[in-house]
Image (spheres, grey):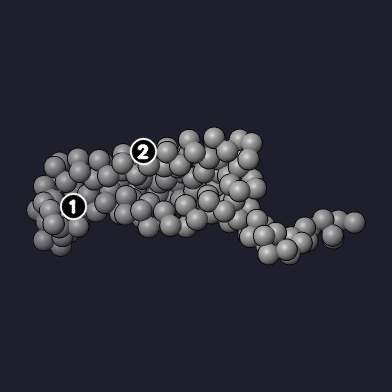
Amino acid sequence: PSNYGLVGIVLLFNIYVLMYLGFQVGKARDKYGVKYPQMYADVNHSKNKKNANIFNCTQRAHQNTLEQQPAFLTVMALSSQKYPLVTGVAGLVFCIGRLIYAAGYSTGDANKRVPGALMAGLLAMMPLMGCSSLFALEQLGIDANIVGKFMK
């Protein structure tokens, strides 16, 4: 489809986002002394609870972004078949939202992750799920133009 190149660029950008977040966790491991194979710092037994919390939030930002990948990649694949421009833009919003999410979360204040979560969830995933649903229904031969029928 036309504009499909944008989808490819966004999917590649998504890989860079994941790599960047992984590098941030690696830097935080060095900075806060969290050794492998420990997934998280033990806040209750840490000498510096604040630093342990910051590390854990940095790690969770990366881990949560990885947890979102199956859903994100699924809706990107489906919706891009018919709506590549919308998919590309929504995918870019998702990636930027995940970076904002991680930047806020990595401060150690979990509440600061909310703007990025809302951006990635409401402004990106919801439209992607909608477009994916429309595409899937149309592939089954179901007329998905329900809104259009009520507008007449």
Task: Give residue 104's position: percent from left, percent from top.
Answer: 37, 44
Q: Where is residue 69 in the image (x, y as percent from the top left)?
A: 41, 53
Q: Can the viewer see residue 104?
A: no
Extreme residue toward the right, this view: 152
Instruction: Locate residue 82 relative to residue 120 in the image: left or right.
Output: right
Q: In which quarter of the image is residue 89?
A: top right
Query: Cα distance, mark 1 to mark 2?
Result: 26 Å
Q: Residues within 10 Å of mark 1 (few under 14, many from 20)?
A: many
For the N terminus, give its image quadrant.
top right
How many C-alpha atoms fall within 10 Å of the one at disc 2: few (<14), some, or many (≥20)?
few
Residue located at (28% from left, 48% from top): 58
Q: Which mark is residue 52?
A: 1
Q: Can residue 1 be seen in this view?
A: yes
Q: Image quarter for residue 130?
A: bottom right
Q: Residue 113, relative to residue 39: is it above or below?
A: above
- Identify the amino acid type marked 1: Ala
| Residue drawn at (82%, 56%) of the image | 148
From the viewer's perspective, tell me whether residue 1 is left or right of residue 47.
right
Circle nearer the viewer, 1 or 2: 2
Residue nearest the observer in this picture, 109 or 20: 20
Are discs 1 and 2 less than 8 Å apart at CB? no
Locate residue 29, reporting x and y percent.
Answer: 16, 46
**Residue at x 54% of width, y 35% of height:** 5
Provide residue 151's location: percent of width, then percent of height: 86, 56
Q: Tag 2: residue type?
A: Tyr
Secondary structure beneath dot 2 equals helix
1 or 2: tag closer to the N-terminus: 2
In the rendered image, the quadrant that contains the C terminus is bottom right
Which is nearer the eye, 121 or 5?
Answer: 5
Residue 16 numbered mark, or none = 2
Numbered disc 1: secondary structure: helix
